[in-house]
Image (cartoon, coloured by chain):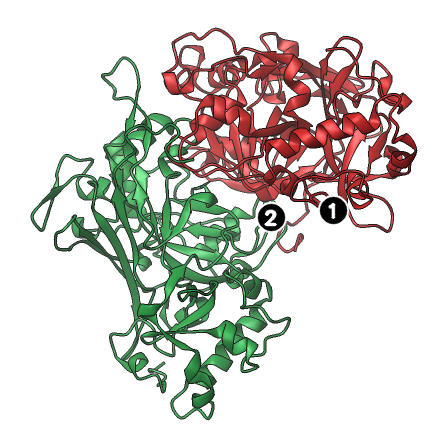
Chain colours: A red, B green
Amino acid sequence: MPLLRSWVDSANRADCDFPLNNLPCGVFSVEGEEPRCGIAIGDFVLDVAGLEEAGLLALDGGPLLDVPFWNEAMEAGPAVWAALRARLQDLLAEGAAEREAVEPFLVPRAAATLHMPFLVAEYTDFYAGRNHAFNVGSMFRGPENALPPNWLHIPIGYNGRASSVVVSGTPVRRPWGQVKGPDQPMPAFQPSRRFDLELEMGAVVGRASEGMVSVAEADEMIFGYVLLNDWSARDIQAWEYQPLGPFQAKATATTISPWIVMRAALEPFRVSTPPREVPLLPHLQEPGPMLYDIALEVGLTPEGGAETVIARTNYREMYYSAAQQLAHHTTSGCPMNVGDLLGSGTISGPTKESRGSLLELSWGGKEPIAIEGGTRSFLEDGDTLTLRGHAQGEGYRIGFGNCSGRVIPAHENPLGAGR
Amino acid sequence: MPLLRSWVDSANRADCDFPLNNLPCGVFSVEGEEPRCGIAIGDFVLDVAGLEEAGLLALDGGPLLDVPFWNEAMEAGPAVWAALRARLQDLLAEGAAEREAVEPFLVPRAAATLHMPFLVAEYTDFYAGRNHAFNVGSMFRGPENALPPNWLHIPIGYNGRASSVVVSGTPVRRPWGQVKGPDQPMPAFQPSRRFDLELEMGAVVGRASEGMVSVAEADEMIFGYVLLNDWSARDIQAWEYQPLGPFQAKATATTISPWIVMRAALEPFRVSTPPREVPLLPHLQEPGPMLYDIALEVGLTPEGGAETVIARTNYREMYYSAAQQLAHHTTSGCPMNVGDLLGSGTISGPTKESRGSLLELSWGGKEPIAIEGGTRSFLEDGDTLTLRGHAQGEGYRIGFGNCSGRVIPAHENPLGAGR
């Protein structure tokens, strides 16, 4: 598919994240007004709530967009998702008759504040990257026991904490937690010293289910994708995670990009998961390509310093797709809801430069990496992490916008500090 | 504290779960009407939404009760909780002047359908029973490695799935899942053969927090308690739980009792957690008694058969209180919300007859227990599990109502069966 040209000139630039092919969903506000639904196009946010109110956009069951979240539009179902997209592509296309009527609803992105694009119902995080699982397993259990026995048979996941999901730009405070090294007789309660990122994609569930769904059905339940940074306190995790998994180590914050890229925008970029090392049971097999070719990178910017790109990888490195994860998620009859968020798991490529966490990049802190003006084993106060991603089309790209967060110092005394 | 006598005669019976001292919060409906908030008193549900509408109950920020959940009343805060309780105790007390005005708002409990008493924001389940952790650890890792190294230092917990929490009376369908025995070369996808209960208490969070809270503050954030059965598929759990903890094994259903017993009603029954085997770090120490003396039992009734009580225990057996769990939950800065539900973990006593799961009662299926007309290792289709609990006062008791669920057969083919 070629670039779809728009009368919004900035949307036609080859390096623009938000061409007419994309139309990702966010929530924005301008000074003095309430947050509402918007769509990114070129250098602008299109006030789709305003378009709806003005009668330029009529959706079944509407109004759906005069609220500070996309959940109502997601609830309306795939026919509405398609109608929304088709109507906006008409309104914004080069030569569109409605240009004059639509133009007043364009807000310069620089003047807009972006908010959480949807209400997170529940948040699940997976562990579905082959290289990440092997790297972490090697560090913790040695390379011969790196992959747990179940890993090649099911997408391993755990329930995360929806209340901790924040939008790009929200500062992330270094957590306190209980930690204990193997040589210490007693644990200590202190700020995390091994605070880390995890480069992931997030899938946003747009349809509810009861009972089990197939992988094909699961794919159709996904409304869209975001970039996702699952901040992780490795020292807290190491002490707490046996036997019931990560808990407080992953509960400080998970940052997502402000734009949900609809699945429809990513269709041209579908790729298959890698060949299976052992066959999957039938209920988890993919009927078609359900990963996406999305180039990803992580930039680290120290306080007052310049950015270093510390990792470059691609979403196609995953062993399991979000559709497979979602199907597995329903096997037990677990009800899924609109607004559920599934983290892909850390996306690490096969090379050292493509690892999606500092834990792997610095090999547990043993091999600090070089950055502009210094080195890093784990995150330091003042570091800003920025995840970027895009799918590359012919003469255009489908981008997600930055997924960014700055580490701010731990409270001196956590008790009572945050109430 | 003695029995507070009510003009509702049935509330004064010594064996009534719902005397004037209790006043637990539920959601009910009668035929043809919408569900709304109600309070149990004797053999009746008091239509407190109706009382509010009639001007007999005025709460700050009200109306709060004309909705099918207690979240709005919880949001209103502890002063409103106390005012509600005080006003209802006045209205329902023996000799109350308002008796004639209030009486029309009593609905016989037998005529009321009970619904989920609150919207579950997020659900966390803990593993805080010393005997349960030792028993399960012994089976999986041998008695010498039974307790994980962190267990005596932090209340181990994991995030569960809020969407799977259901009210007493909801049938529970046996789940499918991926399982693999140690001797099998490949996993299989099949209905669970080791479906189990977990006898727990649930704490309902009534106040939001950001940042860390102390154990004392955490105690005050708890609105009340419910009985909780965390249904668990042991065969699915055994295969999936390494390294990130239980996931689909615990996502089929968690049943709670229909009544939230307010913390205020339990005040006379506070007891301390047991002596520490190793000292806790200061931030987890209890400033006072924060467990409760609540007698608990589990009845198992096979299809068409008679009930056998398979376990009797007490909430005071826990090693950590809900307040300690909640304080630990916030250490990382994890935001807590009104409607969060914390499962205590399985409550097993020191004796065989006081174990809160079939996994422990039948020692992993090796020692089936006797029930009326048969034996059980794990649950069979048609079995009804009923959890009951009460705190025993002088001449009265504070009960929770039954927490009950019947196991119905697995779908023949799970795919597409439940949509």
Subunit bearing disc 2: B
Residue displayed at 20% across by 35% down: B364
Side of B99 relative to A317 (left or right): left
Farthest residue, direction front: A97
Tally of marks: 2
A56 left or right of B118?
right
Instruction: State the CA–CA distance, disc 2 to disc 1.
Output: 27 Å
Label 2 residue SS: loop
Q: Position of residue B394 (x, y in %)?
A: 28, 79
In the image, is A162 to the left or to the right of B368?
right
Which amino acid does the dot numbered 1 rest on?
Asp
Residue under circle 1?
A66
Asked whether disc 2 touches disc 1, contact meaning CB atoms under 8 Å apart, the reply is: no
Give how far across and how far down residue B141 sits, in percent: 28, 30
Viewer can see residue A130: yes
**In the depicted structure, whether residue A417 falls above or below residue B381:** below
Chain letter of the residue beneath label 1 in the structure image: A
Residue found at x 76% / y 36%: A169
Which quadrant of the rendered structure holds the C terminus of chain A? bottom right
Instruction: Please rate how many residues cluster around mark 1, counting C-alpha atoms within 10 Å: few if below 14, some from 14 to 19, many from 20.
Output: many
Quarter of the picture containing the N terminus of chain A is top right
Q: Are marks 2 and 1 on the same chain?
A: no
Left or right: A211 in relation to A415? left
Q: Which element carries disc 1, helix, strand or loop?
A: loop
Tell me the quarter of the picture where residue A117 sits: top right
Q: Nearer the viewer, residue A15 or A283?
A: A283
Q: Amino acid at mark 2?
A: Pro
Task: Give how far across and how far down residue B275 sits, in percent.
Answer: 35, 56
| Front residue (pair A305, A395) | A395
Q: Which residue is mark 2?
A: B335
